Image (cartoon, grey):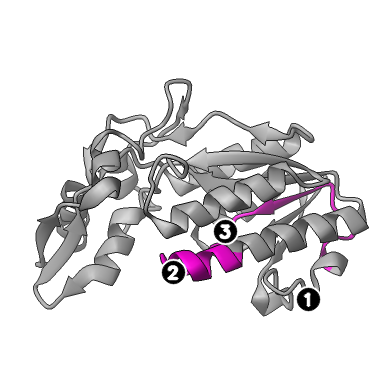
Amino acid sequence: MRVVVLGGTGVLGRYVVQEARSRGFDVVALSRRSGVDLVTGDGLAPALRGADAAIDVTNVQTVRGGPAARFFESTARNLQAAATREGVAHLVVVSIVGVDRLGGFGYYGAKVAQERLHLDGPVDATILRATQFHEFPGQVLSRSTFGPVAVVPALRVQTVAARSVAEALIDAAASGPLRGRLPDVAGPAPARDLPALARAVLERTGRRSSVLRVPVPGAPGRAVRAGALLPAADGALVGPTFEEWLAGTDGPTSA
């Protein structure tokens, strides 16, 4: 089976590529560095040639609604068009649990638009929504630490290992074309407070920053407190737990 992984050099993409190769698949990892620009479509169609499935785990480094919408809508349209031209029968797209329950957050609205364009497109697309990764608290710390203080939003999250999400994405690709959403994927532990997870990362990596817990205001905050970021009742809960991940080889090891 030939699988093309778009965003194959990112946090999730690397695990997707590793998992596909471990199963004996013929894998091509695409990124701008490989000469493929999903936003413009440059180089995309030739890169998809001969593929049985394409997995899109690309992301954009902004939470602003306008830029995020332009990215996800352009990439969805270009991927659908190129897959149609090259006869790729199946697209698998990662999304986020709660994208349709968190009003007022532009990035999530952009992901909803991406899902809709794929589900309405000519090529069968399978959407897999996952909760935030175990890596998420560390990513928040890297963006929100100012001197001795880390400002962390008070989110209820049920984080999942990126490696486990990669396995689920490869399962979806191997199962063949399916148009629609799969059950949510989340970690096996109950919901946790994101600032508490951030403190655990700081302790593990030996950093001395203090965590300032900041409530999320307005409608997004109410939605988060009501469980908007948590999986549906039929979601698949997959390990390892955050603590197991933190202590393992995939977790952070130093500051």
Q: Which mark is residue 62?
A: 2
Q: In this view, does 251 lie above or below 156?
A: below
Q: In the image, what residue type sits under mark 2?
A: Thr
Which one is in front in this view, the residue at disc 3 or the one at disc 2? 2
Q: In the image, what residue type sits under mark 1?
A: Asp
Q: Residue 42 carries which label?
A: 1
Residue at 64 percent of width and 45 percent of height = 116
Which one is in front in this view, the residue at disc 1 or the one at disc 3? 1
Q: Where is residue 230 in the image (x, y as percent from the top left)?
A: 36, 34
Q: Position of residue 34 (x, y in %)?
A: 71, 76
Asked if residue 38 lies in the magenta stretch, the reply is: no
Q: Is residue 100 above or below residue 60?
A: above
Q: Give the range drawn in magenta.
A: 47-71
Instruction: Mark 1 or mark 2: name the one nearer the start of the chain.
Output: 1
C-alpha distance separating marks 1 and 3: 22 Å
Is disc 3 placed on a helix, strand or loop? helix
Instruction: Mark 1 or mark 3: name the one nearer the start of the chain.
Output: 3
C-alpha distance separating marks 1 and 2: 22 Å
Is disc 1 placed on a helix, strand or loop? loop
Q: From the viewer's side, name the closer residue of 248 and 40.
A: 40
Which residue has dot 3 on it?
14
Residue at 36 percent of width and 29 percent of height = 188
Q: Quadrant of residue 222?
A: top left
